[in-house]
Amino acid sequence: MTQAMLLLAAGAYALATLMFLLHLLAGKSRFYAQACLGIAALSHAVTLATRVGELGFRGLAPLPEQLSAIAWLAVFVYLLFSPRAPVAVLGALVAPLGWVAVLSAYAFEVGPLPTTSSDNVWLPIHIAPALLGYAVLVLAAFLSLIYLLQESQLKGRPRGSLFRRLPPLETLDHLNHRFVVWGFVLFTLGIVTGAVLAQRTWGSMWSWEPVQIWSLVTWLMYAGLLQARTVGWRGRRAAQLTIASFVFLLASFVTVNLFFPGRHGM
Amino acid sequence: MEAELVVVGVNHRSAPVELRERLAVASPDVGSVLTRLARQPGVDEVMVLSTCNRVEVLSLVRDADRSIEHLFAFFAEQWPQDAPAVTQHLVVFRGREAIRHVFRVAAALDSLIVGEPQILGQIKQAYRDAVQAGTVGVVLHRCLHKAFAVAKRIRSETGIGSKSVSVSSAAVELASKVFETLEDKAALLIGAGTMGQLAARHLLAHGVRSLMVTNRSFHRALEVAREFRGTALPFEELTRFLHVADVVIGSAAAEDFVLGAPAVREALRNRKFRPMFLIDLGVPRNFDPEIRNVDSVYLFDIDDLAAVAQENREARQREAVKAETIVEAEVAAFVRWLRSLQTVPTIVALRERVEAIRRSEVDKLISSLPSTNPELRQALEGMTRRLVNKILHEPITHLKKDSARHHALYVAAARRLFGMDPEEEEGE
């Protein structure tokens, strides 16, 4: 049942991606793209809810499941935002992200689950802001990519339908700033609640686990980015720095999960 | 003889501008021209559309062939010195073609720049003039209102008017790809070229908050600033206030660049790297192209703007194809209506014919009687009138009611049965 639902979500994500591309490049209506993405998000949510219902929150611990949850949250936040800030091109990026995440959740079998932290109330309190923070930072990185794309168009001779559909640079920069602020706040919450969780589970708040060190370094990078904005690092430089921080976040996230799981992951 | 819509005139396709501008009807003369047109034989309703791209007479006429000749003669009389040229360049649209032409003109599909917004206002004015002159009847009323509705529908259902096709509106379009809103932005106009002033006007119309003006001649800067309600600033101090401007328009007549990359870099530092939008409308160019390489500065020259405008014009042409489909559907609907309208003359003719028979029979009977009794005559008149009315009541109700389907058939049958078109078959 979950597997079938995953396939449905994958199909809807693929269709949504196509619709967004048609919207951006051929000027077709955005409505169908949004609708497909909505259906995809709904079926995707069902698979996640089923999993959490069966296994508890530790069911989200394996890497593909974490990715799946983050992608879903990113899609969800986009859908919440899109009526007010119609950045359709962002939809064209979150839809394939959802597609990849759903497919990887479908393809990889569930490994052994962490046993230590099964019934702790702090587990969901840690997981929720951490995953949501990742999702928001994904969106911030996407917005930065779009910024760089739009800027390169404006620096050259702007042409074509894509250029017309891209939002103004100022809008992208403002949105990026807001998303980084929120992502940073949530990320911080994730670290703090993680420390509390570690205290409850293992008796010590900070044990220099790889995931903790990487998280701290990434946190510092985002803190630096926000600081740089106050002294006039905006626009292209802010976008580049957002992307750099995100690459760091992604690399640390993946390598920590795959190679240095410690007691955190599996 | 069926009434038919015709358009006779010259437009930008058929006649050169030298001729069109001589034919243009000045607005004080429109009334008298309309009155004289309405007196032409066969002309029932008439209006004149005179713009810089066309001088066209739209008219509802009986006996189109002859009326068109009269209209040709009218053009020749109205502009005697151009008479041979006029008749050579006149174009004619008839019936369905004429309706299509009116709809296309109103929707700016026949304009030099497809989708331009002025024509609708001009055709509305022409309609008002004709209404005032009393030369518009039921058909032109309906035709023009339909044309306005078609234009509105095309504007909302296609992208025909949505893109900027002039250089200065392209500047606004590009600015709105950098800035979220222009409403909190300050603009700076360097120089006093026509293009620059046009661009400044466009930007102000789109909400730019304030305008600074500078010029090598401070006197000229003051003049321009007064016109735009802006602030004049001395050119020598350009670098001191450059950082205040979000938008800079260059339109100075200068041999050298008035703005180089170092000055812009400095300004950007002073404004904490908030983006700047520069348009260079000067020929030769006012801004050093090196400025393009400065971060967060977006510089466009006249060629860039022209390219955007050109691309938008091509996009409009593509939208125009959609618009033509809408026009076709509306023309078909209007033709249907026009056909249904022919009921009225049919009914009138039917009444007249039967009334003639009644009267002649009553007269015959009265004259055959030995004595003329007024009371008897009155009774006969009353009786026959009631008889005729009762007989005609059913067919006339039917003709009036059944105005959509098979209508032409009924009208044709009624005409044939009552012998209303003795010498010709009704043709379509």
Image (tube, helix red, strand yellow):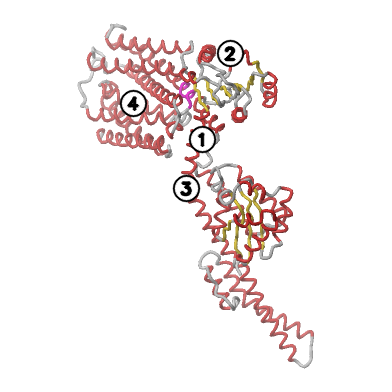
Residue at mark 2 to residue at mark 3: CA–CA distance: 50 Å
Q: Are marks 1 and 4 on the same chain?
A: no
Check residue A71 in the rendering and tell me which mark sits there, or answer none. 4
Mark 2 or 3, which is nearer the eye?
A: 2
Label 1 lies in what chain?
Answer: B
Check residue B239 in the rendering and tell me which mark sits there, or answer none. 2
Q: Amino acid at mark 2?
A: Thr
Going from N to C along the chain, the mark reached first, 2 or 3, is: 2
Q: Name the outermost residue toward the bottom.
A: B370
Residues B281 and B388: in front is: B281
Dominant secondary structure of the magenta stretch? helix
Mark 2 or 4, which is nearer the eye?
A: 2
Q: Secondary structure at mark 3?
A: helix
Q: Which residues are magenta?
A: A168-174
Residue at mark 1 to residue at mark 3: CA–CA distance: 19 Å
Q: Amino acid at mark 3?
A: Val
